Amino acid sequence: MRDFSFVIALLAAGAVCVAAQDVHVKVDPKGGGSIASTNNFPTIQNALDHAPQAPHGRIYIEIAPGTYNERINVTRLRPRLTLIGLGKRPEDVVINASQNAKSAGGTYFTETAQVNADDFEADNVTFQNSAGPTGQAVAIVVRSDRVVFKHCRFIGDQDTLFADFGRQYYVDSYIEGGVDFIFGNATAVFERDEIHEIRNGYLTAQSRTAEEQTTGYVIDHSKVTDVATTGADGKAPSLFLGRPWREYSRVVVMNTELPEQLNPAGWSAWGRGDATPRAFYAEYNNSGPGWKPTERVAWLHQLTAVQAAAFGAKRFLAGKDLWNAVAEAAKLP
């Protein structure tokens, strides 16, 4: 009888080697790179299009400091891809464009960055749409599963971050906008982030369409900031944590510092005239001058500690494959 143990050992060793085959390339316009180069590229999209494949590993694209005035598309053919900014701060690597709905032909054509590949990661990068207060202008649209953004910045005005599909984890990051600037129907957690409102408006416009969907946004251990103030007429500020883009919109804000400019009601029904909207909006253990639980809308859910635990990043993003978003983020610099 043949002894196959040696063959099996070789096959196992080969499998380990294959799994470890990551690809590392660099983007540096000043580095003499060309589209044909295998290790340095002049633009981010060049690297996305032409970096060597990593069928059993991860593609790491390291980006030199600078402002990259380009629109990028991470297609589904590029799974397990990581963008890493080489600056000291995320402000040092900026991906910028300035399309708005009017110039692009609709909101869904305005994005500076489009991410469709699963297992995407970004660290120390700014995604920006600099169109300003000209209507809908998306900085990034994310339609992929098991996504991590760490130490990133998302800059825009209306509709900055389109978190639309899949499980997404935004940690130690900064998100800025004016109206509905975190929107879509992803299952997303925003942890230890600063969410900055540049004028009175709405932080979120989550779009869950059915009660049984597991999608929703969780803002946890974060800080909401606002430059707006109460008007000279003395009326209450009009900053709100969210309004339902779709009927079963779901957003949870917990362990988060809220600003004085937040309207005491906290949430808006989007003027639909429904005294008890089907949206699931909830809060737990918030703080700051904007935390006024007794003045919130009557249909807000005030969570217990046990209920809030279900919305922590590890549990809320786990899914059937038990993905550990917190552990994945810890692997990034």
Image (tube, helix red, strand yellow):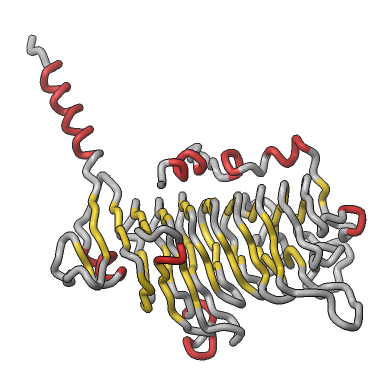
Q: Quadrant of residue 267?
A: bottom right
Q: Quadrant of the N terminus?
A: top left
Seen at 36% across and 54% down, the residue is: 82
Q: Is 286 drawn above or below residue 74 in the view shown?
A: above
The residue lying toward the viewer, choosing from 280 and 43, is: 43
Residue 191 picture location, percent across and down = 60, 50
Residue 167 picture location, percent across and down = 52, 51
Residue 47 picture location, percent across and down = 26, 65
Tally the numbered discs: 0
Seen at 81% across and 59% down, the residue is: 290
Seen at 63% across and 42% down, the residue is: 312
Instruction: Name the residue at the left extreme.
Output: 2
Left or right relative to 62: residue 191: right
Residue 68 picture location, percent across and down = 36, 74
Instruction: Name the residue at the front extreme.
Output: 88
The residue lying toward the viewer, choosing from 276 and 194, is: 194
Left or right relative to 201: residue 19: left
Q: Quadrant of residue 243?
A: bottom right
The residue lying toward the viewer, choosing from 170 and 209, is: 170
Seen at 76% across and 58% down, the residue is: 258
Left or right relative to 249: residue 278: right
The residue lying toward the viewer, choosing from 92 and 308, is: 92
Instruction: Name the residue at the top extreme.
Output: 1
Q: Is 151 drawn above or below residue 184 in the view shown?
A: above
